[in-house]
């Protein structure tokens, strides 16, 4: 289990690829995709800064207050710096 970061501290005067709707939410890593260029750094000419990339599954009902299909899940690909270990 992991929890996503709740801030955009990685990029000054920019944004990250961490969707707002998963910030500070808990999910489960379901796949590891190896190391990839961190676009947050590369887009600002800070180098490629490769990081591990994971697919993280979130329960829809944990993301939205009014969830019509509570059994649904959402899978988001996220870089390691967006994640914290969570028990």
Image (cartoon, rainbow, N blue to C red):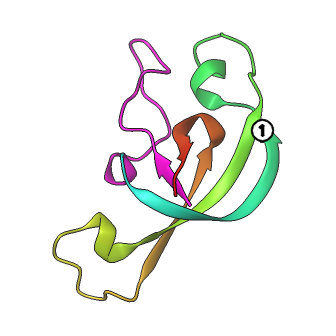
Element at label 1: strand
Q: Is residue 54 left or right of residue 40?
A: right
Principal secondary structure, stretch drawn in magenta: loop
In the image, residue 47 sits, relative to residue 31, either above or below, namely above
Q: Which residues are magenta?
A: 1-23
Q: Residue at x 64, y 60 (%)?
A: 55
Query: Looking at this rendering, what residue extends furthest in the front direction?
Result: 87
Residue at 77 percent across and 29 percent down: it is 50
Residue 24: x and y in percent read 36, 47
Q: Quadrant of the N terminus?
A: bottom right
Going by the image, does 16 lie left or right of 56? Answer: left
Residue found farthest to the left: 66
Q: Nearer the viewer, residue 31 or 38?
A: 31
Q: Is residue 39 magenta?
A: no
Tell me what residue is drawn at x 46 percent, y 46 percent. Answer: 4
x and y, in percent, of residue 38 in the image? 67, 30
Query: Which one is nearer the viewer's eye here, 69 or 30?
Result: 30
* Residue 80 left/right relative to 75: right
């Amino acid at each position: 289990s992991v929890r996503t970061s709740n801030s955009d501290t990685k990029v000054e005067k920019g944004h990250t690829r961490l969707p707002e709707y998963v910030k500070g939410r808990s999910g489960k890593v379901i796949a590891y995709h190896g190391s990839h260029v961190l676009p947050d750094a590369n887009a600002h000419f800070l180098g490629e800064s490769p990081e591990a990339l994971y697919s993280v599954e979130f329960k829809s009902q944990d993301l939205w207050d009014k969830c019509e299909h509570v059994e649904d899940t959402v899978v988001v690909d996220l870089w390691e710096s967006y994640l914290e270990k969570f028990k």
